[in-house]
Amino acid sequence: MDRQHDGSDVPVSTPTPRGRDEIRTAALDAAERLLRANPPDSVSMRAIAEEANITYSLLNRHLGTKQAIVDAMLARFEDRWRVRAAGADLAGALGMMMGDDPDAGTFLRLLAWSILSGDADLSTYRRHSAMHELLPLVDEAGGEASGEGPDAETVVAAGMAMIYGWRFFNPFITRMLDLEGADVERLHTEMGRILRERATG
């Protein structure tokens, strides 16, 4: 449901998407809105169709299963990151992946849900993943090419393990360390600094 500019719940007319491209875009936009606010398990295909102002049959015809929608959204997030990171060095690219705040974000929550559900097609995901694009940045940072550090795959794997591990598990880690509020933000900032230093060291 759309809302008035004053934030009230009065519904306003939403144009019905027409054609394959409009329907796919509207459906993915709707899914992103719903999944940003709700756990993946609680978001149904019918809810996505209703949010997108299309029929369930159109959603099923143009995007298929819920897992197919999740896969399309993961690819969409990767494409956004690729645009943002264009021209960045290794430290900058990893810093963007770490993000500005400790919340895991929709992308990582979806990725975790997709993997843990056992329905993920990792070969499909790999075709869209921007992770392999970090490998040449290791050489540019003077890592593997200098012969003094680990190979590019190890550098990238270590960086991604730190990013995913922190962003997935920081609620548990900070709770166990009795941290909250500003202390969590400070720790997130320090984790990002350490990540960037390791990338350039």
Image (tube, rainbow, N blue to C red):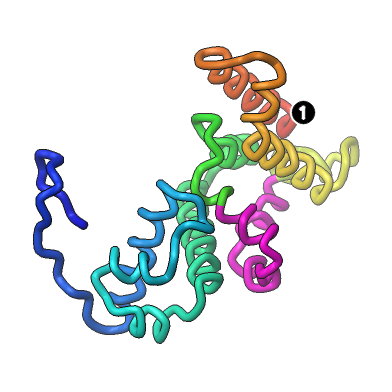
Majority secondary structure of the magenta segment?
helix
The x, y position of residue 85, in whole percent, is 52, 47
Magenta span: 110-137
Depicted 16 relative to depicted 111: above or below: below
In the rendered image, which residue does mark 1 sit on?
Answer: 201
Q: Splitting the image into 4 quarters, where does residue 33 fall?
A: bottom left
Please tell me which residue is depicted at 49% across the width and 48% down the height of the picture.
Answer: 106
Q: Splitting the image into 4 quarters, where does residue 32 fall?
A: bottom left
Q: Residues within 10 Å of mark 1 (few under 14, many from 20)?
A: few
Q: Does the magenta stretch include residue 67?
A: no
Depicted 73 relative to depicted 81: above or below: below
Instruction: Give left or right: position of 14 versus 155.
Output: left
Depicted 20 relative to depicted 142: above or below: below
Tally of marks: 1
Frontmost residue, 178 versus 95: 178
Please tell me which residue is depicted at 52% across the width and 64% down the height of the picture.
Answer: 75
